[in-house]
Image: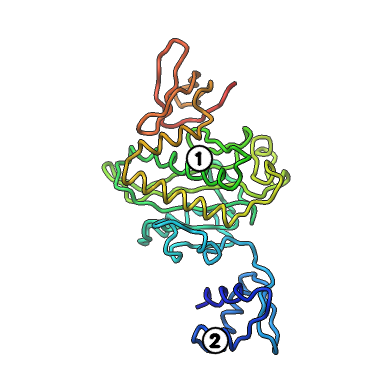
Amino acid sequence: MRSRVLELLKKYQPDFVSGETIARELSVSRTAVWKAIHYWQDKDYLIESSPRLGYRLLQAPGWLYPVEMEGKLQSKLIGMPVEKMHHFLSLESTNETLKQLAEKGASEGTVVLAEEQTRGKGRLGRSWSSPRGKGIWLSVLLKPAVFPQEVPVFTLLAALAVSRAIRMNHPELKAGIKWPNDILVHEKKACGILTELKAETDRIHYLVAGIGLNADQEEEDFPPDLAPSATSIYLESGKKADRLQLAADMINQLDHAYHQFCSQGARPIIKAWKEHSITLGRKVTISHPAGDYPGKAVDISADGALVVEKEDGTRKHFHAGEVTLRR
Protein backbone atom coordinates (compact mmCIF):
# COMPACT_ATOMS: atom_id res chain seq x y z
CA MET A 1 0.00 0.00 0.00
CA ARG A 2 2.85 2.39 0.81
CA SER A 3 4.31 1.78 -2.65
CA ARG A 4 0.95 2.56 -4.26
CA VAL A 5 0.73 5.82 -2.31
CA LEU A 6 4.15 6.78 -3.65
CA GLU A 7 3.06 5.88 -7.19
CA LEU A 8 0.07 8.22 -6.87
CA LEU A 9 2.26 11.05 -5.59
CA LYS A 10 4.44 10.58 -8.67
CA LYS A 11 1.39 10.36 -10.93
CA TYR A 12 0.11 13.75 -9.78
CA GLN A 13 3.55 15.36 -9.54
CA PRO A 14 4.16 18.35 -9.58
CA ASP A 15 0.59 18.99 -8.39
CA PHE A 16 -1.01 18.26 -5.05
CA VAL A 17 -3.24 15.25 -4.52
CA SER A 18 -5.65 15.17 -1.61
CA GLY A 19 -5.55 12.53 1.06
CA GLU A 20 -9.20 11.85 0.29
CA THR A 21 -8.39 11.12 -3.37
CA ILE A 22 -5.56 8.77 -2.43
CA ALA A 23 -7.73 6.98 0.12
CA ARG A 24 -10.56 6.58 -2.40
CA GLU A 25 -8.34 5.31 -5.22
CA LEU A 26 -6.60 2.78 -2.97
CA SER A 27 -9.66 1.87 -0.89
CA VAL A 28 -7.89 2.62 2.37
CA SER A 29 -8.49 5.00 5.28
CA ARG A 30 -7.19 8.57 5.48
CA THR A 31 -5.19 7.47 8.52
CA ALA A 32 -3.47 4.77 6.44
CA VAL A 33 -2.58 7.40 3.83
CA TRP A 34 -1.19 9.71 6.51
CA LYS A 35 0.97 6.88 7.91
CA ALA A 36 2.25 6.06 4.43
CA ILE A 37 3.17 9.68 3.80
CA HIS A 38 5.14 9.81 7.05
CA TYR A 39 6.85 6.53 6.15
CA TRP A 40 8.20 8.01 2.92
CA GLN A 41 9.14 11.26 4.62
CA ASP A 42 11.21 9.20 7.07
CA LYS A 43 12.85 7.61 4.01
CA ASP A 44 14.08 11.07 2.94
CA TYR A 45 11.36 11.79 0.38
CA LEU A 46 10.56 15.51 0.37
CA ILE A 47 6.75 15.61 0.52
CA GLU A 48 4.87 18.85 1.12
CA SER A 49 1.68 18.67 3.17
CA SER A 50 -1.15 21.20 2.97
CA PRO A 51 -4.37 21.07 5.06
CA ARG A 52 -6.36 22.34 2.07
CA LEU A 53 -4.57 20.81 -0.91
CA GLY A 54 -3.21 17.48 0.32
CA TYR A 55 0.24 16.17 -0.50
CA ARG A 56 2.85 16.94 -3.15
CA LEU A 57 6.06 15.07 -3.92
CA LEU A 58 8.84 17.62 -4.31
CA GLN A 59 11.90 15.42 -4.49
CA ALA A 60 12.92 11.78 -4.24
CA PRO A 61 16.08 11.09 -2.21
CA GLY A 62 18.03 9.39 -4.98
CA TRP A 63 18.60 6.25 -2.93
CA LEU A 64 18.49 2.82 -4.55
CA TYR A 65 15.13 1.92 -3.08
CA PRO A 66 13.61 -1.21 -4.65
CA VAL A 67 10.31 0.63 -5.13
CA GLU A 68 12.14 3.16 -7.32
CA MET A 69 13.87 0.44 -9.30
CA GLU A 70 10.90 -1.85 -9.83
CA GLY A 71 9.72 -0.28 -13.06
CA LYS A 72 13.19 -0.54 -14.55
CA LEU A 73 13.66 -4.25 -13.82
CA GLN A 74 13.17 -6.86 -16.53
CA SER A 75 14.66 -9.80 -14.66
CA LYS A 76 12.82 -13.06 -14.07
CA LEU A 77 14.68 -14.29 -10.99
CA ILE A 78 17.20 -11.86 -9.55
CA GLY A 79 15.49 -9.19 -7.49
CA MET A 80 12.05 -10.33 -8.57
CA PRO A 81 9.56 -10.06 -7.10
CA VAL A 82 10.85 -6.81 -5.68
CA GLU A 83 10.33 -8.11 -2.13
CA LYS A 84 13.52 -10.13 -2.69
CA MET A 85 15.51 -6.90 -2.67
CA HIS A 86 16.77 -5.63 0.71
CA HIS A 87 17.95 -2.02 0.88
CA PHE A 88 20.03 -0.47 3.66
CA LEU A 89 21.37 3.04 4.10
CA SER A 90 24.48 1.61 5.78
CA LEU A 91 25.95 -1.87 6.22
CA GLU A 92 29.31 -3.31 7.12
CA SER A 93 29.22 -5.50 4.00
CA THR A 94 26.49 -6.49 1.55
CA ASN A 95 28.15 -9.89 1.11
CA GLU A 96 28.15 -10.59 4.84
CA THR A 97 24.52 -9.52 5.23
CA LEU A 98 23.43 -11.66 2.29
CA LYS A 99 25.30 -14.68 3.63
CA GLN A 100 23.40 -14.27 6.90
CA LEU A 101 20.12 -14.16 4.96
CA ALA A 102 21.18 -17.24 2.99
CA GLU A 103 21.79 -19.14 6.23
CA LYS A 104 18.22 -18.26 7.24
CA GLY A 105 16.83 -19.71 4.02
CA ALA A 106 16.70 -16.72 1.66
CA SER A 107 15.60 -17.75 -1.82
CA GLU A 108 17.75 -17.68 -4.94
CA GLY A 109 17.81 -14.26 -6.55
CA THR A 110 17.75 -12.35 -3.27
CA VAL A 111 19.60 -9.02 -3.53
CA VAL A 112 21.14 -6.82 -0.83
CA LEU A 113 21.82 -3.17 -1.67
CA ALA A 114 23.51 -0.58 0.51
CA GLU A 115 24.11 3.13 0.08
CA GLU A 116 27.28 2.75 2.14
CA GLN A 117 29.54 -0.05 3.34
CA THR A 118 31.61 0.56 6.44
CA ARG A 119 33.66 -2.62 6.01
CA GLY A 120 33.39 -3.37 2.32
CA LYS A 121 35.82 -6.00 1.13
CA GLY A 122 37.55 -7.07 -2.03
CA ARG A 123 39.61 -10.07 -3.04
CA LEU A 124 42.45 -11.36 -0.86
CA GLY A 125 41.03 -9.67 2.25
CA ARG A 126 41.46 -6.15 0.95
CA SER A 127 39.11 -3.38 2.05
CA TRP A 128 36.80 -1.67 -0.47
CA SER A 129 35.99 2.02 -0.18
CA SER A 130 32.20 2.44 -0.32
CA PRO A 131 31.14 6.04 0.46
CA ARG A 132 27.45 6.83 0.94
CA GLY A 133 25.46 7.50 -2.20
CA LYS A 134 28.54 7.50 -4.43
CA GLY A 135 28.45 3.98 -5.83
CA ILE A 136 26.43 0.82 -6.33
CA TRP A 137 27.17 -1.72 -3.63
CA LEU A 138 25.12 -4.87 -4.08
CA SER A 139 25.26 -8.63 -3.60
CA VAL A 140 23.24 -11.36 -5.31
CA LEU A 141 22.39 -14.83 -3.99
CA LEU A 142 22.57 -17.72 -6.47
CA LYS A 143 22.13 -21.46 -5.99
CA PRO A 144 23.39 -23.04 -9.22
CA ALA A 145 23.42 -26.82 -9.61
CA VAL A 146 27.15 -27.00 -10.35
CA PHE A 147 30.29 -28.40 -8.78
CA PRO A 148 32.47 -26.04 -6.68
CA GLN A 149 35.25 -26.15 -9.30
CA GLU A 150 32.89 -24.43 -11.75
CA VAL A 151 32.48 -21.34 -9.55
CA PRO A 152 35.19 -19.24 -11.30
CA VAL A 153 32.87 -18.94 -14.28
CA PHE A 154 30.39 -17.02 -12.10
CA THR A 155 32.96 -14.31 -11.45
CA LEU A 156 33.33 -13.96 -15.21
CA LEU A 157 29.55 -13.95 -15.56
CA ALA A 158 29.15 -11.13 -13.05
CA ALA A 159 31.94 -9.10 -14.65
CA LEU A 160 30.32 -9.53 -18.07
CA ALA A 161 26.96 -8.34 -16.74
CA VAL A 162 28.45 -5.21 -15.16
CA SER A 163 30.50 -4.39 -18.25
CA ARG A 164 27.38 -4.70 -20.40
CA ALA A 165 25.40 -2.45 -18.05
CA ILE A 166 28.08 0.25 -18.06
CA ARG A 167 28.32 0.15 -21.85
CA MET A 168 24.53 0.44 -22.14
CA ASN A 169 24.50 3.58 -19.97
CA HIS A 170 27.87 5.03 -20.98
CA PRO A 171 28.96 3.66 -24.39
CA GLU A 172 31.59 6.38 -24.65
CA LEU A 173 33.58 4.88 -21.76
CA LYS A 174 34.28 1.50 -23.42
CA ALA A 175 34.43 -0.36 -20.12
CA GLY A 176 36.46 -3.56 -20.27
CA ILE A 177 37.17 -6.55 -18.06
CA LYS A 178 40.55 -7.28 -16.55
CA TRP A 179 40.70 -10.95 -15.64
CA PRO A 180 39.09 -12.17 -13.54
CA ASN A 181 36.97 -9.63 -11.73
CA ASP A 182 37.86 -5.97 -12.36
CA ILE A 183 36.10 -3.52 -14.66
CA LEU A 184 38.52 -0.94 -16.00
CA VAL A 185 37.79 2.37 -17.69
CA HIS A 186 40.75 4.09 -19.31
CA GLU A 187 43.10 1.65 -17.52
CA LYS A 188 41.71 2.52 -14.08
CA LYS A 189 39.57 0.33 -11.84
CA ALA A 190 35.90 1.31 -11.68
CA CYS A 191 34.42 -1.91 -10.33
CA GLY A 192 35.43 -5.00 -8.41
CA ILE A 193 33.62 -8.30 -7.87
CA LEU A 194 33.95 -10.71 -4.96
CA THR A 195 32.44 -14.19 -5.25
CA GLU A 196 32.04 -16.24 -2.09
CA LEU A 197 30.37 -19.59 -1.55
CA LYS A 198 29.30 -22.22 0.90
CA ALA A 199 29.94 -25.65 -0.52
CA GLU A 200 30.81 -29.27 0.07
CA THR A 201 33.13 -31.36 -2.06
CA ASP A 202 30.48 -32.24 -4.61
CA ARG A 203 27.88 -29.46 -4.38
CA ILE A 204 27.24 -25.79 -3.73
CA HIS A 205 24.85 -24.70 -1.02
CA TYR A 206 24.85 -21.12 -2.25
CA LEU A 207 26.99 -18.52 -3.97
CA VAL A 208 27.13 -14.81 -3.19
CA ALA A 209 28.38 -12.44 -5.89
CA GLY A 210 29.27 -9.02 -4.47
CA ILE A 211 29.67 -6.05 -6.81
CA GLY A 212 31.16 -2.67 -5.98
CA LEU A 213 30.82 -0.08 -8.74
CA ASN A 214 32.27 3.41 -8.36
CA ALA A 215 29.60 5.71 -9.77
CA ASP A 216 29.86 9.31 -8.56
CA GLN A 217 33.09 9.52 -6.59
CA GLU A 218 35.29 12.54 -7.05
CA GLU A 219 39.05 12.33 -6.62
CA GLU A 220 38.92 13.30 -2.95
CA ASP A 221 36.51 10.43 -2.22
CA PHE A 222 39.23 7.83 -2.76
CA PRO A 223 41.76 6.97 -0.04
CA PRO A 224 45.31 8.10 -0.96
CA ASP A 225 46.48 4.54 -1.62
CA LEU A 226 43.67 3.94 -4.15
CA ALA A 227 43.54 7.32 -5.90
CA PRO A 228 46.23 6.54 -8.51
CA SER A 229 44.54 3.35 -9.72
CA ALA A 230 40.81 3.88 -9.04
CA THR A 231 38.20 5.85 -10.94
CA SER A 232 34.45 6.34 -11.22
CA ILE A 233 31.83 6.81 -13.90
CA TYR A 234 31.67 10.51 -13.00
CA LEU A 235 35.43 11.06 -13.20
CA GLU A 236 35.66 9.43 -16.62
CA SER A 237 32.45 10.76 -18.18
CA GLY A 238 32.17 14.16 -16.51
CA LYS A 239 28.55 13.57 -15.58
CA LYS A 240 26.73 11.99 -12.65
CA ALA A 241 25.57 8.43 -13.17
CA ASP A 242 21.90 7.49 -13.12
CA ARG A 243 22.46 5.05 -10.27
CA LEU A 244 18.91 3.68 -10.33
CA GLN A 245 19.05 2.84 -14.03
CA LEU A 246 22.59 1.52 -13.80
CA ALA A 247 21.78 -0.72 -10.83
CA ALA A 248 18.65 -2.01 -12.57
CA ASP A 249 20.61 -2.75 -15.74
CA MET A 250 23.26 -4.58 -13.72
CA ILE A 251 20.54 -6.80 -12.22
CA ASN A 252 18.87 -7.29 -15.61
CA GLN A 253 22.14 -8.32 -17.21
CA LEU A 254 23.03 -10.62 -14.31
CA ASP A 255 19.65 -12.28 -14.66
CA HIS A 256 20.05 -12.69 -18.43
CA ALA A 257 23.56 -14.12 -18.18
CA TYR A 258 22.59 -16.48 -15.35
CA HIS A 259 19.63 -17.89 -17.27
CA GLN A 260 21.88 -18.28 -20.30
CA PHE A 261 24.41 -20.21 -18.21
CA CYS A 262 21.71 -22.45 -16.71
CA SER A 263 20.30 -23.29 -20.15
CA GLN A 264 23.42 -23.34 -22.33
CA GLY A 265 26.39 -23.77 -20.01
CA ALA A 266 29.56 -21.70 -19.77
CA ARG A 267 30.43 -21.51 -23.47
CA PRO A 268 28.33 -18.43 -24.44
CA ILE A 269 29.37 -16.64 -21.25
CA ILE A 270 33.06 -17.14 -21.93
CA LYS A 271 32.62 -16.19 -25.60
CA ALA A 272 30.94 -12.90 -24.65
CA TRP A 273 33.45 -12.30 -21.85
CA LYS A 274 36.29 -12.45 -24.39
CA GLU A 275 34.62 -9.69 -26.40
CA HIS A 276 34.74 -7.44 -23.32
CA SER A 277 38.25 -8.46 -22.22
CA ILE A 278 41.16 -6.04 -22.03
CA THR A 279 43.46 -8.79 -20.77
CA LEU A 280 43.62 -11.18 -23.71
CA GLY A 281 46.35 -10.44 -26.20
CA ARG A 282 48.42 -8.45 -23.72
CA LYS A 283 51.58 -9.22 -21.82
CA VAL A 284 50.82 -10.02 -18.19
CA THR A 285 52.51 -11.07 -15.00
CA ILE A 286 50.60 -13.43 -12.71
CA SER A 287 51.49 -13.01 -9.05
CA HIS A 288 51.00 -16.47 -7.59
CA PRO A 289 52.00 -18.20 -4.33
CA ALA A 290 54.44 -20.25 -6.38
CA GLY A 291 56.03 -17.08 -7.76
CA ASP A 292 55.52 -14.54 -10.53
CA TYR A 293 54.71 -15.92 -13.96
CA PRO A 294 55.20 -13.57 -16.94
CA GLY A 295 53.80 -14.22 -20.39
CA LYS A 296 51.03 -13.32 -22.79
CA ALA A 297 47.35 -13.84 -21.97
CA VAL A 298 46.06 -15.86 -24.92
CA ASP A 299 42.78 -17.47 -23.87
CA ILE A 300 40.17 -18.32 -21.25
CA SER A 301 39.54 -22.02 -20.63
CA ALA A 302 36.11 -23.62 -20.34
CA ASP A 303 36.33 -23.43 -16.54
CA GLY A 304 37.28 -19.75 -16.46
CA ALA A 305 41.05 -20.10 -16.11
CA LEU A 306 43.39 -17.58 -17.74
CA VAL A 307 45.74 -19.23 -20.23
CA VAL A 308 49.18 -17.62 -20.26
CA GLU A 309 51.78 -18.42 -22.92
CA LYS A 310 55.50 -17.94 -22.36
CA GLU A 311 57.94 -16.93 -25.06
CA ASP A 312 58.93 -20.55 -25.63
CA GLY A 313 55.31 -21.46 -26.43
CA THR A 314 54.52 -23.29 -23.20
CA ARG A 315 51.13 -22.54 -21.72
CA LYS A 316 49.84 -22.58 -18.17
CA HIS A 317 46.31 -22.20 -16.75
CA PHE A 318 45.63 -19.92 -13.76
CA HIS A 319 42.42 -19.98 -11.74
CA ALA A 320 43.53 -17.34 -9.26
CA GLY A 321 46.23 -14.77 -8.73
CA GLU A 322 46.91 -11.08 -9.11
CA VAL A 323 47.31 -9.91 -12.70
CA THR A 324 49.53 -7.05 -13.76
CA LEU A 325 48.95 -5.89 -17.33
CA ARG A 326 52.02 -4.85 -19.32
CA ARG A 327 52.25 -3.06 -22.62
Look at label 1 and name its amino acid.
Answer: Arg
**Residue 282 rendering spot, x and y as whole percentages:** 53, 22
The residue pinned by badge 2 equals 23
Q: How crowded is the residue under tag 2: few (<14 C-alpha within 10 Å), some, or many (20+)?
A: some
Query: Residue 75 falls in which quadrant of the image?
Result: bottom left
The tag earlier along the polypeptide, 2 or 1, is: 2
Residue drawn at (44%, 10%) of the image? 312
Q: Which of 47 and 289 is in front in this view?
A: 47
Q: How far apart are marks 2 and 1 (CA)?
A: 50 Å
Residue at the location (46% across, 15% down)? 310
**In the image as oriented, which residue stretches furthest toward the top?**
312
The residue at 54%/86% (across/down) is: 23
Q: Where is residue 225 in the image (x, y as percent from the top left)?
A: 67, 37
Q: The residue tagged with tag 2: helix, strand or loop?
A: helix
Mark 2 vs mark 1, foreground winner is: 2
The spot of residue 61 in percent (x, y) is 65, 65
Where's residue 62, x and y in %? 63, 62
Q: Identify the residue under disc 1.
A: 123
